[in-house]
Every structure is written in structure tokens, then in C-alpha cells.
Image (cartoon, rainbow, N blue to C red):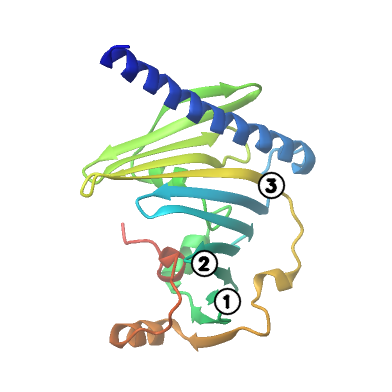
Amino acid sequence: MSEAERTRSGGRAAAAAIGGILALVIASLAGAQEEAAPAAQSAPNTYHTTAHVRGDMGMRVIDYWSRGPDMLARTLVGGHPIVTIVAGGRYIVYDGLTGKGLDIARSERALAADVGRERPFAFELEEVQAEGGEKIEELLFGSRKGEIWQITDERGRRKVWVTAGVPQVPLRVETFDRSTAATVDMDYQNWIFGLEFPDAFFAPPPRVELQRFEFEAFLDAASQRPVAAVPILYPDLLIGPPPS
């Protein structure tokens, strides 16, 4: 086989792999909609999905749950289950192994960014649209419709596969950073809507030991010394998005 034939074959294999992933994700999404979506075409108030992130750092799996602006995310980092809770104006993060973490008041900018969002995660499409991205393709997987949006600028390229209609959720995100030549891929799988959550779901268990800060006090303390050995994985939900 010639080099050109191998290149074409590799490209077809990659395209088939991506198509297979998206087909499986859309199929699971369609099943969830049949079970949970109301007859009226309105966005649900609760969401769950699992994100698979691949890049130079290896692979990371994140489980997300949300109810309106409230969120619980669980991420395995170096063998430690890191739990992040955003609820009631507080940003709580703790290590499930050590039982230690932080409870920080969210900034006014972060709270303002909640307004108008359907959920506090998986808003890559909205970010691409806000930055001037364009819809470059419409897709059809069985009976499910989808779209691809993309933006290319001096920072690099971001490409987002999303479902069409309501609810509109991302299925895949590809990010290329021009300054580092690094690529990060993310697949969202097993979207489920309309779950019922008890209020206690978005609260840390009693055994967890948390250092409590107001927002400005946390910034001041963090500028002087490491505050806690637990990562802030979603700084935009604590500090707010960068000023436009």
C-alpha cells in the first residue's frame, strides 16, 4: 500500500471512529429523551452526563449532575475522588479520600453568569457562539439531527458537535491550542434528563472537614500561601468568566 493510500485509509478509519462514538452517544441520548423528556419542547431542569477527556495529561473521566444552577461533579485525580459542589452561592470542593476541602463564597461575577444558563457545565456551544463561531455542518444519525460548530482564531481552534432541537447538548468537543500545539478531546456520553434530586445531594457529607472563606478573603489567603491541597477544577464557577 502506498503512503497516499495509507493516509486515506487512516483518515477514513478516524472518521468512522468519530462517527461511531457520536452515533452511540446520540442513540443513548434518544433513549433518555423518550423516557424523561416532557411532551412540550422545553429545556429540562436537571441533567446528568459523563465526560471523557483525553489530552497530554492522559485520560480523565468526570461525572456531572445539575439542577438549575446547582452542580455536583466528581473527578478522579491521581487516585483521589475530587468532588466539586456549586450550590446556594457557595463553591465547595473536597477530597473524598482525605475528607478535607474548601467552602468558598462565589464572586458576584460568577453568580451573574448563572443567569440564563440551563446548566453550569457543558456550555461549550454557547462559548463558541459568543466568540463568533459558525455552524459548519448539519448531521443526521438515524432519526437524530445534529450540528457542528467551529471557531478558528489566533488562539487555535475549537470544534463542537451538538444535538439539534431541545435540549441542545454537546456530544464532542475538539480543542487545538496554537501556542502549545496541544489537542484536547472531550466526549459527553449518557445524557439523562429529568432526574429527581434530594436537596442533600448538593451538600457535602457531615464527615467532611471544610475551611470556610468569603470570596475576597480566599483570594487574599491564596495569594500568600497554598490554602489547601485540593484543586479548584472549575475556576470560572468560583471567580466568574473572564471579562469580555
Q: Which x, y percent locates residue 211? A: 50, 88
Seen in the picture, residue 48 relative to 31 is either above or below; the reply is below
* Residue corresponding to mark 3: 192
- Tell me which corner region of the image, top left, top right, bottom left or bottom right, holds residue 169: top right
Badge 2 amino acid? Gly
Circle 1 — which element? loop
Q: Mark 3 or mark 2, which is nearer to you?
A: 2
Seen in the picture, residue 75 relative to 221 is either above or below; the reply is above
Alpha-carbon distance for marks 1 and 3?
28 Å
**Residue lying at the far front of the rendered structure:** 1
Circle 2 — which element? loop
- Image quadrant containing the N terminus: top left
Residues packed near mark 2 inside 10 Å, few (<14), some (14 to 19) or many (20 plus): few
Q: Which x, y percent locates residue 40? A: 74, 39
Badge 3 amino acid? Ile
Seen in the picture, residue 61 relative to 79 is either above or below; the reply is above
* Residue corresponding to mark 2: 79
Left or right: where 123 falls relative to 174:
right
* Residue corresponding to mark 1: 97
Seen in the picture, residue 175 relative to 109 is either above or below; the reply is above
> Of the residues under marks 1 and 3, which one precedes in the sequence?
1
Residue at left offset 49%, top offset 80%? 104
> Of the residues under marks 2 and 1, which one precedes in the sequence?
2
